Image: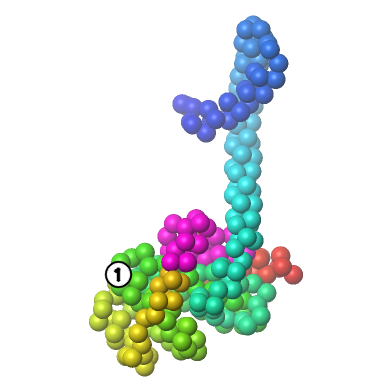
Amino acid sequence: MKPTLRTLTLLAALLAPALHAAPFTPEQEARIKELIRETLVANPKILDEAAESWEKQNAADQASQLGNFIKGNQEVLFNSATSPRLGAKNPKLTLVSFTDYNCPYCKQFDPHLARLLKAYPNDVGLVIKLLPFKGQTSAKAAQYSLTLWQQDPARFLALHDKLMSKQGMLTEADINKALAATGNTALKPEARATEELRNSLRIGTLLGVQGTPATLVGNQLVSGAIPYEELEQIVKAELARKG
C-alpha cells in the first residue's frame, strides 16, 4: 500500500519530536527511525488511532473558532432588526437559516424549519438570512420580502412561503404573481433591504457558508438539506445542552 498524504503527515509528526528534541548522531537518528518503523509494522493500528485523534482535534479546533466568532457577532446574527425572525418570542435556542429563493434544496428544506417551529413553539426561534447566490431574481425576491418584513413583519411569512413554494428558478413574472397573491402589488424595495443583503453576505462569508441552505444551530453550522429527523436530533441535543 502506498503511503497517503495523511499517513506521511502523521509519520512526520511522530518523527519530529524524536529528531529535534536533542542533537543525535546520524547512527542514533537512523536507529530511532528504525525503531519507529518496527513499532508501526508491529502495531499498524497506531496510525489509524493517530489519524482519528488528529481529526478529532482538528474538529475541536474548528468548533472553538466557530464558537468564538458567534460569540463576537451575536447582534448581527441573532438580533438584527432588519433580519426576519420567526418562532418563539423568547426562545431557548435561536437558529439562523442562510437561504436563497432560487435554491432547490432550500425549497426542500424550508418546510423542515417550519415544522420544527411548530413542534417547539416556546423553545425555538429562527432568524432568516437571505443569500442571493443564484442570480438576479434571487436578489429581487429577497429585496421584496425583506422590505415587507421591515414595513409590516406580520405579512412577511405569506410572501416568503409563496416565493419558496415556487419550484424551479423564479422569473420576474413569478415574483409579480407572488406579490399579487399576497396583496403586495404596491410594494417597492427599499435601500434597507439591499443593506440587509450585504450584511447577510458578509456574515455568511465570515462564518464559512459556502452554499445554501446552511443552518446555524448553537455552535454548529449544518450544511445542506438534511432530513427533518436529523435536524430535530441536533436541535434536541442543543436544547438539552442549554438546559
Residue at position x 33%, y 65% in the image: 134
Residue at position x 37%, y 73% in the image: 101
Q: Is residue 189 left or right of residue 11?
A: left
Front residue of 135 and 124: 135
Mark 1 sits on what residue? Answer: 136
Label 1: element kind? helix
Residue at position x 54%, y 80% in the image: 86
Residues in magenta, as a range: 198-222
Q: Residue furthest bottom?
A: 183
Q: Quadrant of residue 16?
A: top right
Crowding at mark 1 (Cα within 10 Å: few <14, some 14-19, many 20+): some
Front residue of 201 and 100: 201
Relative to residue 144, is residue 53 depicted above or below? above
Visible in this render: residue 164?
Answer: no
Visible in this render: residue 43?
Answer: yes
Give amino acid for label 1: Gln
Q: List x then y, in percent, for residue 7.
A: 54, 30
